[in-house]
Amino acid sequence: MTTLNINGKSVEVDADPSTPVLWALRDTLGMTGTKFGCGVAACGACTVHINGQPTRSCVTPIAAAVGQKITTIEGISNGRVGKAVQAAWIAHDVAQCGYCQSGQIMTATALLEGNKKPSDSDIDAAMAGNICRCGTYQRIRAAIHSAAKTLA
Amino acid sequence: MDPALIATRLAGQARTSRAPGKLDRREFLKLTALAGGGLAVAWTAPSVLAADEATAATPKKPIDPSAFVKINPDNTVEIRVNRLDFGQGALTALPMLLAEELDVDWSQVNASLAPAGEAYKDPIYDIQMTGGSSGVPNSWVQYREIGAATRAMLVAAAAEQWHVPVSACTTGSGLVRSGAHKATYASLAAAAAKQPVPNKVVLKAPADYRIIGKGKRRIDAAAGATGKKNYGIDMRLPGMKVAVLVRAPTFGGQVQSFDASRAKAVKFVQDIFEVATDLGGSGVAIIADGYWPAKQARDLLQVTWKAGVGGLVSSDTLFASYREAAKNPKLTAVKGDVSAAASATKHLGGEYQFPYLAHAPMEPLNATFEVRTDGATVWAGTQFQTIDQGAIAQTLGIKPEQVSLITLPAGGGFGRRAVPTSDYLREGATIAKAWRERQGGQAGPLKVMWSREDDIRGGYYRPAHLHSVDVALDAQGQVVAWDHVIIGQSILKGTPFESFEVKDGIDGTMTEGVAENCYALPMRLRITHPDVAVPVLWWRSVGNTHTAFVMETMVDEVARAAGMDPVAWRLARLDAKKHARRIAALKLAVDNSGYGKPLPAGHAWGLAVHESFGSVVAYVVDVSIDAGRPKVHQVTAGVHANQVVNPIAAEAQIQGGAVFGLAMTLPGFEITLKDGVVQQAQFTDYPPPRITDAPPVAVHFVPSNDPPTGLGEPGVPAIAPAIANALAALTGKRLRKLPLDLSSA
């Protein structure tokens, strides 16, 4: 058993220590909001926060996450920034298929936690690790600017 | 309301609905799923179809009671959507159509995806499907008529109760009113169900629209933003196991032998066994409690493979063979006279190359199977419900009606979830069946999952193509002959669609975008469809992905050779009446773009316009080159898609389509093969556009109340040629191979 702290709660995971946080979340804990896109940290769909840092859960073994604070899309609305980002995502109708959006929202929230008024190039730099095959990038930029305004 | 009664009565009407407007070849189809799998496809002449419609009042099979609309006791309305929603917004747009005519407030409306079912077949194609940008166009009449007929029955019920004429009743916000009388739709439901279904309904005039044409956000936006939206891959059932399938490195390859001793020792791995795979191959299935142990086992599995039949393709030799084939094409698709080429003053053109392309939707392919003694339930985000239902039934050795296929939202698809041969569902069903047999008939549900590597290497690509174009000009720069050759695999040969899309051996999905010859050129178009052992499939906008590039870059070159502005050249060649929509879209894009104004050093303007799936999209772009990549600074789109039902989603489809199409130009965005083995496997070596590649796209629609045309695909074709035209203006060099090689620019 591995004990993880997820969204402020302590949970037991019966899985091999090499198991990525992604699969502990999805298969063991039934928290499917975090998505599988590539398995090699190339697309960002699986992004969670570990101690506030956007982290690719598909390559982070649970053994490495013990004692760390994991936040997922299911818990991001507990924070003021996460809530504002989610609201902006809805207001701007960002999602098309929506599959990558959990990861996009997690990365955007981490950006705004550290940069209250990001420029377009700040946004591009922060979001470049998150692929969206539907091509929602323009609305992602708009939603991040809009969330920044509501948080100001 | 008794939904059963209304739905049954409406069924006849629903089945006779058809998209108005221009008929194309696809609208004459009658497709019927066959018991035991497969699909019957018949070509129906328009006159026969009209006669058929007149007598089609009786549905073939009983309709699901709550097929399309249900009014709940709390006066909310649930609308079923007979399409997959994989980002294009059908889950929102189709309910908008129905709610408009039902006269309810949008806030009262809930929507859900319909399972596979007779009632949900496309009223025109007669299969349940999502593709060809046909969702709104083909549902335009059907969904509004169902709403209008239901409303008429509610009004009739109220009028009867209140002893007033129907004409004295009004509706709105889910209420019927007349003088001092007022009743909710919910309270009238039982009485409405007893009313006769109107033979004819009058649909609203555009001036009366309260929902159509007004932007609505995705109906599932909140669920999406909070991680609560469940896709196929998110299926969880008690006792469910996860399967992965290790396929051969070559298409149709087979297992020679395998050693699972180490793989089987992985904790939580249940079983490992050989199964038949797609294309006559075989592979090794791994069943585990979750994806990770299955992946661990996969990494430890030792397999020796036998190559598949049909030759081991290499991209280099393939294009060399296509080049040879282009010297002597077998079939003539457009029979124009090109004899003037011999005496021409000048020739333009050359050879164009387009690689195989994987769809790479964000959600890897998957499906969940629960196989029982009495049948099976399957959960999948598929574009082809009734075809897949038949294929699954055939694989399991049961009847289609024994397969309950539940449609779940999909994380993209772009064509990959519309497979005529149902490859991933047949494979999944094969594994589920074998697993159940190995468990002595007592197996729980099984989720079959693809990895990203499986997806990129898995075939069903946009076919590779070679175009060879010789454009002959006279001394004034006028085109005197346009001799065009296309070599590429047929997508539809050997599929159930062959009989209608392939005419005289020519697959219309390869020649679309050239054969229409909108610029009225003296054109000859010849083709060959080589047989190549690489499975191919439609990729968002299908043949237009390559034909638009060739046509729109070539005419740009012709215009410049004639010393004409490329906009002026196009406008001069387009027929004012026949191509009025194309002209309007092009002008709209140009007028809103600042086209022609001076740009910063190192930038250039480019443009292209293309019609596909009934809609025209013109792009004007501002492009520079940044470290060997095209850098698109701004895109202005002019779009003619007739009546836009949901402007918010329509804009998104064009913006997303532009990014999707832009991918074709980017370094590395190609699938190549060497000795039958796909050389790419991940987003790292098959890199889609990232936010850093994505320009702002300003979208302008030509106002229209004509019946809607497609929007899911038409945003794709014109972007790559617009970019290439800008780059040619910038560098003076024409690049005829995608992805673009700007390493020397």
Image (spheres, rainbow, N blue to C red):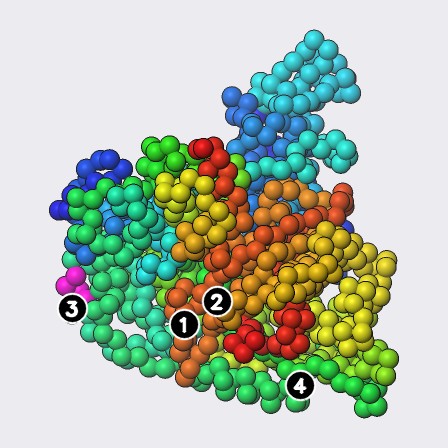
Judge whether B419 appears above or below A44 on screen: below
Q: Give the amino acid at mark 1.
A: Gln
Mark 1 in CB contact with mark 2 (< 8 angstroms) = yes
Q: Chain of mark 3?
A: B
Whole-number angstrom distance, CA of label 1 to CA of label 3: 27 Å
SS at mark 1 in the image: loop
Q: Please tell me which residue lies in front, B150 or B245.
A: B245
Whole-number angstrom distance, CA of label 2 to CA of label 4: 27 Å
Residue B659 vs residue A111: left or right?
Answer: right
Residue B270 visible, this orientation: no
Q: Which residue is mark 2?
A: B358
Whole-number angstrom distance, CA of label 3 to CA of label 4: 53 Å
Residues drawn in magenta: B262-266
Q: Position of residue B45 (x, y in %)?
A: 75, 61
Mark 3 or mark 1, which is nearer the start of the sequence?
3
SS at mark 2 in the image: loop
Mark 1 or mark 4, which is nearer the start of the sequence?
4
